[in-house]
Structure formats: structure tokens, C-alpha cells
């Protein structure tokens, strides 16, 4: 092994130290949240001492659930059901709609396709806040419903662009072989393209889930009934109501964050693979 290729132990040590510090920076808030949810309220907001696992119990979880025990306050199960329903529809239907639209842009030939691609790219930089007010007046008669919370977000320019970027890089020989065997566009898409596109599907799933699960502005504008509140709106209302109990607020936060961690762990393999392949292409 040449001197230029010999691994520098000091550089390796510094790399591991930097990665460890970075990992701790990401893990520390989650650890603080979990430990705080198990401690008495007066010991939660206590600086670095909040990391000490002492006097742990499930009292905060029981107390938080007990405070949501009437139609006036809403029920925690209703909040969870709303978030799960809305997020599931946006993710699952969005995967079908956005991937099909991206495939049409990437592979099919039709008049105006290039102009449509430009339009999709332009829409990716348009923030939701720019259209929130017109959308509010358009759907004002459908407030406090489930579908008004997911209907505007099923189609996503950003998701279409991610799918489009991935599909453009796929070898055309796979699809040409399918056409020779008599497969049409839909069969080619579902039998050939989708199975080899797991990385981009995982990426879109994670990003869409994170965005939808944490959506706050649109529910604030459209939902004022406790029974239809998603979790982000519910925790915002909860933490502003006396008596203020940080232990219970942390317990609410843990139950809200838990599905996000589960989804990421389920799809992290293909998500990392997608990032790695993007780096190789670049």
C-alpha cells in the first residue's frame, strides 16, 4: 500500500469524533423528549439534568389521556385517527398519482410535455403559503371534514419532480423489452418500472409522510371542531391550556413523534440507497 493510500489514524479518529458529535446532536432532543415524558413535570425543564433518568413513571401519559375525555376537549384517539387517515390517503394515493404523472412526463410522447415539465419545476418553488388564502375561500364550505385536509395535497409538484428525475435515469431497454412482449404503458409501468424504483418510492413516502403528519397551517385555517383536529393542531391547543404540565406535553409529543420514527425505520434502507445512487449520478 502506497503512502498516499495509507489511512491516517488521526484523520480517522477526528472523523469518528465529528460523526459521534453530530449523531448525539440529532439524538439528544429525542432522548430529552422521551425521558421528560416519564418524569414529574417540575423536573422536566431542568437543563442538562433533564437527561437524568430518575423518578420515571407513566403518570404523564395517563394524565394527558385523562384531559381529553369529552366532546369539548376532543379525544386523543380521534386526533390520532385523523392524522393517520389524512396522512395515509395523501401518501398512498399520492404515490399512485404522482408516480403515474411523472412516468407520463418522462417516457410518453405527447404535445406540450416539455412545457408541462417546466410548469412542474416552477411549481416546486411555490410555497403553500402563497396559495393558502385562495384555497381557503375555494374550500370554505367543506371545513371540519376529513377530505378537506387531504384533498389539496394528494398531487404534489415536488413528488412528481422526484419521480420524474428518477424515471429519466432508468435504462430504456427494460421498457423496450416489455413492449416487445406486448405490454402496454400501464403494464410496463406497474410490472417493470415500479419494482425497480423502490428507492424513489421510499424517499417520496418518507418526505410526504413527514410533511403531512406535521402539517399545521392548513388545519388551523380549516378545522375548529375538536373531533377533526389532527395531532399538530391538537398539541398546539393542548400546550396553551391551563394547567400547564410539561410532562404531559412531552408525553403527547412522544406519541406524536413515534409514527414518524417507525416510518423512517421501515423505509430507511431504500431511502439511503436513493441518496447513494443520486450521489453516484451526480
Image (cartoon, rainbow, N blue to C red):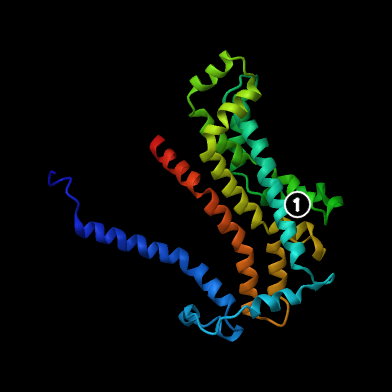
How many neighbours does mark 1 have within 10 angstroms: few (below 14), some (14-19), or many (20 or more)?
many
Q: Which residue is mark 1?
A: 149
The C terminus lies in which quarter of the figure?
Answer: top left
Q: Does residue 194 sit above or below 132 in this rendering?
A: above
The residue sitting at 75% across, 77% down in the picture is 66
In the image, what residue occupies the spot 71% across and 72% down?
A: 238
Badge 1 marks a residue whose secondary structure is helix
Compared with 141, 242 (above or below) is: below
Q: In the displayed structure, does residue 6 sit left or right of residue 38?
A: left
**Snapshot quadrant of residue 224:** bottom right
Q: Nearer the viewer, residue 129 or 20?
A: 20
Q: Is residue 46 visible?
A: yes
Q: Position of residue 113 (x, y in %)?
A: 62, 24
Residue name at image x 70 percent, y 63 percent: 231
At which x and y percent is residue 164?
Answer: 56, 33
Q: Quadrant of the N terminus?
A: top left
- The number of discs equals 1
Which residue lies most toward the right here?
Answer: 141
Report if residue 165 is visible in the image: no
Residue 44 position in % (x across, y down): 56, 81
Closer to the camera in the image, 157 or 82: 82
Work out whether 48 lies above or below 226: below
Q: Position of residue 86 (x, y in %)?
A: 72, 52
Amino acid at each position: 500500500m502506497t503512502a498516499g493510500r495509507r489511512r491516517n489514524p488521526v484523520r480517522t479518529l477526528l472523523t469518528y469524533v465529528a460523526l459521534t458529535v453530530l449523531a448525539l446532536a440529532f439524538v439528544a432532543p429525542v432522548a430529552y423528549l422521551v425521558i421528560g415524558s416519564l418524569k414529574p413535570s417540575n423536573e422536566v425543564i431542568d437543563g442538562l439534568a433533564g437527561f437524568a433518568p430518575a423518578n420515571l413513571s407513566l403518570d404523564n401519559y395517563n394524565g394527558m389521556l385523562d384531559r381529553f375525555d369529552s366532546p369539548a376537549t376532543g379525544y386523543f384517539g380521534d386526533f390520532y385517527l385523523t392524522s393517520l387517515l389524512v396522512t395515509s390517503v395523501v401518501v398512498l394515493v399520492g404515490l399512485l398519482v404522482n408516480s403515474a404523472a411523472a412516468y407520463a412526463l418522462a417516457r410518453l410522447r405527447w404535445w406540450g410535455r416539455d412545457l408541462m415539465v417546466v410548469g412542474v419545476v416552477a411549481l416546486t418553488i411555490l410555497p403553500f403559503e402563497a396559495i393558502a388564502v385562495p384555497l381557503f375561500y375555494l374550500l370554505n364550505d367543506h371545513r371540519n371534514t376529513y377530505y378537506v385536509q387531504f384533498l389539496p395535497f394528494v398531487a404534489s409538484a415536488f413528488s412528481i419532480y422526484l419521480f420524474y428525475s428518477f424515471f429519466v435515469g432508468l435504462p430504456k431497454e427494460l421498457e423496450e423489452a416489455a413492449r416487445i412482449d406486448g405490454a402496454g404503458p400501464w403494464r410496463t409501468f406497474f410490472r417493470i418500472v415500479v419494482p425497480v424504483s423502490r428507492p424513489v418510492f421510499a424517499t417520496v413516502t418518507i418526505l410526504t409522510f413527514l410533511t403531512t403528519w406535521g402539517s399545521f397551517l392548513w388545519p388551523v385555517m380549516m378545522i375548529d371542531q375538536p373531533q377533526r383536529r389532527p395531532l399538530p393542531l391538537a398539541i398546539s391547543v393542548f400546550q396553551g391550556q391551563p394547567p400547564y404540565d410539561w410532562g404531559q406535553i412531552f408525553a403527547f409529543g412522544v406519541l406524536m413523534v413515534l409514527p414518524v420514527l417507525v416510518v423512517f425505520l421501515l423505509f430507511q434502507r431504500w431511502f439511503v440507497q436513493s441518496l447513494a445512487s443520486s450521489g453516484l449520478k451526480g
